[in-house]
Image (cartoon, rainbow, N blue to C red):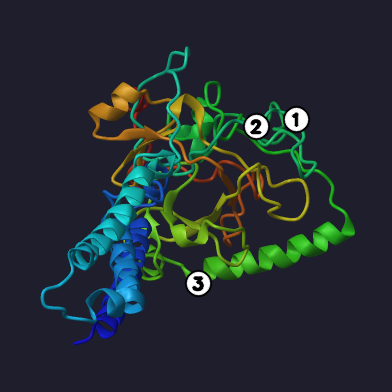
Amino acid sequence: MDTRTWGLRAALVGLVAQAAGLGLDAWMHANDPSLAEREGVFTLTNAGHALFFGGIVLAGLGVLMALFGGVLYGRREAPARAGLTVARIGVPVVVVLVLVAGVRVASSSSLAGGHHHDEAESGHTHDDTEVAGTHTHAAGEPSDDHEDDRGHADQHGDVITGAVTGDSACERSGPPSSPGQVAADSEGHGARGPLRQEPLTREERTRLEEQQTQARAAAARFPTVADALAAGYRMSTAYVPCIGAHYTNSALVVRFDPAAPSELLYDGTAPDSRIVGLSYLVWHPGGPPDGFAGPNDHWHQHNFNGGLCFKGGVVVGGEEMSRERCARVGGAKREMTDIWMVHDWVVPGWECSWGVFGGECPELGGRTAGTAWDPPAARGAAAAGS
């Protein structure tokens, strides 16, 4: 086999290895959405990344041999000149070393790090109660309580005071069960209760109707957890009163599309558990996405106190959980910088009375890690984290 043929075949194998690496990496991220915050492009401990960059090295060497192999190895002189012998051995070795060194330098740089930002522990004191599933939507730096780049007010929305009585199924299910129940210390959902609705223009109303028609059609495609799993969604929280069990498709996080929600919310985690709502988890640096038409979709993040507690890609503790408590349950506190989230309660029968974009649904009660239909945990037991 001549050197050109050998080089082309090596380059082809390298390209196949790159494609396989990308595929493996995509599969790993689909099964563990928290990978995006734990690693960067050059994190070589990820098998997909290692295979991809190994393919680059092999393809580079193959191209070199295809182009210059004839010069280096085409003639068989007897005896071979010393300089040619050195070149035959040294050139490919130098090329491989340069490629490997480049990847190694990058793997030791900030490009290998995830999106997690270590922050000093907050000066607040917190109840270390374990929350079996809040949101997977940790995020970056908190927004000021001023208008954002869409002209929206505070991202939490304007809650109507005096409207929360403590009698809703959501409120009777805790505390604590969801970010709204630890709102005094949390920068996630904000104060619980119905959101004050701002007026829409005719154009906004028409556009919102179109978007919500698309959202309802999307919810109808995934009536059960089994349907979500078959479509590539994976459980990212257990069932949590007020917000449901979250199932995430990380491939849909890259943009806002009313017809393709990145998260589906269910009344439990059994295969036949029913859908109760949608959640749009969107990566959008620099602020919330444009999202739904009008000013009433108040996007939020979860970044307080080091973010949420993840274990194997599933949230096992909320923002109020300390790093130490999270570590004791086998998890790690993480943020997901530039990730924004909003709920959309458009499933028929679950048009929640605190607003279609409310952070919580008051009708959604039950028991954490159970279903919406279980009796609430005893308040003393909930407070003890049992």
Residue at point 34% right, 52% down?
32
Q: Secondary structure at mark 3?
A: helix
In contact (CB < 8 Å): disc 2 and disc 3: no
Q: Earlier in the sequence, mark 2 or mark 3?
A: 2
Distance of label 1 from label 3 (alpha carbons): 37 Å
> Can residue 165 be seen in this snapshot?
yes
Question: In the image shown, does 275 or 294 lie closer to the viewer?
Answer: 294
Q: Position of residue 83 (x, y in %)?
A: 22, 63
Residue at point 52% right, 38% down?
139
Kindly identify the amino acid type of the residue bearing the numbered disc 2. Answer: Ser
Residue at point 32% right, 59% down?
53
Disc 3: which residue:
221
Q: Earlier in the sequence, mark 1 or mark 3?
A: 1
Q: Position of residue 56 (x, y in %)?
A: 34, 64
Would you identify the image quadrant in which residue 383 lies?
A: top left
Q: Position of residue 312 (x, y in %)?
A: 28, 46
Disc 2: which residue:
143
In contact (CB < 8 Å): disc 1 and disc 3: no
Question: In the image shown, does 8 or 137 lie closer to the viewer?
Answer: 8
- Give the answer, above or below, for where 33 lies relative to 68: above
In contact (CB < 8 Å): disc 2 and disc 1: yes
Q: Secondary structure at mark 1?
A: loop
Disc 1: which residue:
146
